Amino acid sequence: MKKRIFALVDCNNFYVSCEKVFKPSLEGQPVIVLSNNDGCIISRSNEAKQLGIKMAQPVFQCKELIAKHNIQIFSANFVLYGDMSQRVMNTLRRFTPELEIYSIDEAFLSFTNFIPKDIIRNSKKIRDVVKQWTGIPISIGIGPTKTLAKVANKIAKKHTEFGGVFDITNHPRKKELLSNLDVIDVWGIGRQFARFLGKHRIKNVLQFINADEKWVKENMTVGGLRTLLELKGVPCADIDEVHDSSKTILSSRTFAQSIREVSDLKEAIASYVSIAAEKLRAQKLVASMIHVFVTTNRFNRKNYYSNSYYLELSEPTAYTPILISYASRALDEIFKKGYEYKRAGVLLTGLCPTHSVQRSMFPGMTSELQEKKNRLMSFIDRLNFRWGRGTVKSCAAGINKVWDTVQSQRSPRYTTNWDELLTVGF
Amino acid sequence: MQGAGIADGDLLVVDRSLKPANDSIVVAFLEGEFTVKRVKIKGKCLCLIPENKRYAPIEVTEDSDFLVWGVVVSVIKTFN
């Protein structure tokens, strides 16, 4: 078999880069993007990174820095980011038929059919085309395995001298660069494994590559061994074109203002269930379990409460009203009066394809009724797709929404909304 | 941009994948603002020509804070 060549394309500071496309004056300035409800920092321009702003840092912790350096702030605009992501992915698809969308800003590509000596030149071309067509800067890491492609991408980002493209295969500086990379930076090595390795004086990637395979398998399970083999250049995973990211579906938010009443909390939960169920149906899946969680402000230690509860459904379903009634029962189990709730969410698990569902021994509904419910859901989904989420919704999800999210500094949805297009002067 | 048939309130269709050629109409980002202009390329020199004769052509130098954002391929007009 032909030797595999993998590339990992990663969009640089993706959310900030999306904002910059439509506001080029942000170039060279410190810019940050905040999570839903403007809570935490989820994307930073290089200038903001240099000022010491950390990823996932709560924004109130850096108020002084923001004021002092006039850091530009944006609320998350996921409609815009999602659309820009699709544009980047569609552009990448022109260069290789084998592409795995790994996250909103990352994709694995197969370069196996590229001529090895042309790889760097082709990668630079891809980088230029994506930049010109979408405005988004990307970095490309190349290697004989997916894990090495990810490592190469880290190096491409860290060392500007490579011009955003780095091929680790047979690179003369490979050992030196790997010895300067912490094990925590490797895909598949979490904080726990990193701490464990640190105790055994394995701190950088080169040291880990030289570790004993048997020892790694015994102490870090098969997953750790796979990571090690991949780092040694033995491919253990291929391009996964239908990426199965959906083992679970999560829908949760931080509230704009704290909630005390169970009725408000139920509305919020019902609305999150509706979103999760819509995602479920879009992937032609049904859920067999529903988890509900609530939490108060974690920075208020005195009056802190956090709890979760799950229920198994009598039959796997994607029918919103049934899921809402289960979620409501689960919430009753964990709700306590006297707390100021700040966040809640639902998690759907035990997902399986609609067609492979085992019917329960005492099915709750006839197949005719089932068919009716399916048609209702798909009709609602189409309406909401056409006219915007929430056009048709369950009454349980509430009308007033005291808990709705704040997005005080969201930029226009330039690419998806006629009323928010970019305007230009003469 | 009356000369190019572009009026206030029109909708521009912009293709970012195109490189501007001589006489292209472009959306440019110049000195902190988006603007639509016609491009004249003379050798290495790039000029932005406002179609409205009352305004003077703008010569773009290396020091200019300037970016061609995309090439305008169509204009859509709305009546009423």
Image: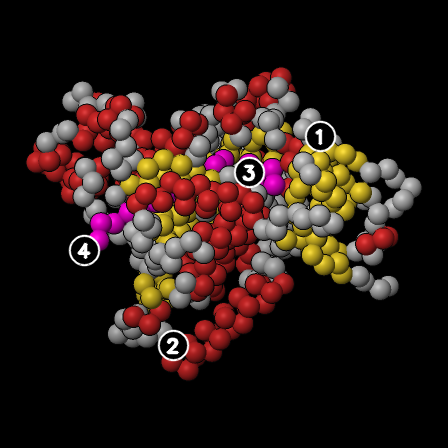
The residue that label 4 is drawn on is: A1
Q: Nearer the viewer, residue A273 or A225?
A: A225
For badge 1, the amino acid type reads: Thr
- Assess whether mark 4 and mark 1 are in contact (beta carbons under 8 angstroms): no
The residue that label 2 is drawn on is: A365
Q: Residue A124 sits in which quadrant?
A: top left
- Residue A348 visible within the image: no
- Assess whether mark 3 and mark 4 are in contact (beta carbons under 8 angstroms): no
What whole-number distance in Å separates the C-alpha atoms at marks 2 and 3?
50 Å
Classify residue A291 as left or right of residue A223: right
Q: Nearer the viewer, residue A377 or A52?
A: A52
The chain holding disc 3 is A
The chain holding disc 1 is B
Q: Are marks 4 and 3 on the same chain?
A: yes
The chain holding disc 2 is A
Residue farthest to the left? A214
What whole-number distance in Å separates the C-alpha atoms at marks 4 and 3?
39 Å
Q: Are marks 4 and 2 on the same chain?
A: yes
User: Is residue B29 positioned above or below A184 on the image?
Assistant: below
Q: Nearer the viewer, residue A54 or A86?
A: A86
Q: How many marks?
A: 4
Disc marking residue A17: 3
